[in-house]
Image: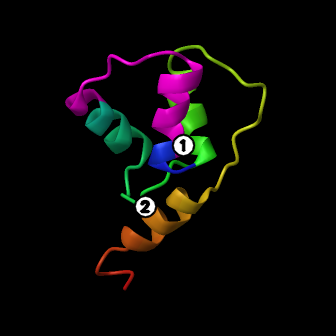
Amino acid sequence: MNYFDFFNFIENTMGINELEAWEKDSLECRLDKLNFAFIEFNEFNEFCDGYKISFGVRIEDRDLESIIEEKMNVSYKTY
């Protein structure tokens, strides 16, 4: 989901209007480590899991971010 939809849900559906700019920035950084400007479902699921919130959906082993991270973390020896 994109940032707009995420924060729109937080403010309008959940009724949380008190988030400071730094709190929004922190959430964006935590949920979008590679700065894709969207939040992957697996990342959101992992985040919620830390707070014992479960949606009953299995987290995929390899999501887009993990595939790209693997490609970016190639050592010079491997390259």
Which residue is drawn at the image coordinates 42% and 57% (left, top)? 37
Q: Nearer the viewer, residue 69 or 26?
A: 26
Q: Which residue is mark 2?
A: 36
Q: How many marks?
A: 2
Which quadrant of the structure image shows residue 41?
top right
- What is the chief secondary structure element of the magenta stretch? helix
Instruction: Name the outermost residue toward the front.
Output: 12
Q: Which mark is residue 64?
A: none
**Front-lying residue, 19 or 54:** 19
Mark 2 or 1, nearer chain start: 1
List the single residue furthest toward the left: 22
Q: Is residue 16 above or below residue 7?
A: above
- Name the quarter where the C terminus is drawn: bottom left
Magenta span contains residue 22? yes
Q: Position of residue 40 (x, y in %)?
A: 57, 49
Where is residue 69 drawn, in percent x and y?
44, 63
Coloration of the structure image:
rainbow
Compute the Cα span from label 2 to label 1. 15 Å
Left or right, 50 with reference to 76: right
Q: Which residue is mark 1?
A: 5
Q: Which residues are magenta?
A: 5-23
Three-letter residue code for mark 2 = Phe
Question: Which residue appears at 54% of the width and 43% of the height?
Answer: 5
Q: Is residue 69 above or below residue 7?
A: below
Front tag of 2 and 1: 1
Q: Residues within 10 Å of mark 1 (few under 14, many from 20)?
A: few
Question: Element under label 2?
Answer: loop
Q: Position of residue 51 (x, y in %)?
A: 51, 15
Residue 73 is situated, as x and y percent measured from the top left of the image, at: 37, 67
Three-letter code for the amino acid on which mark 1 is drawn: Asp
Q: Is residue 20 magenta?
A: yes
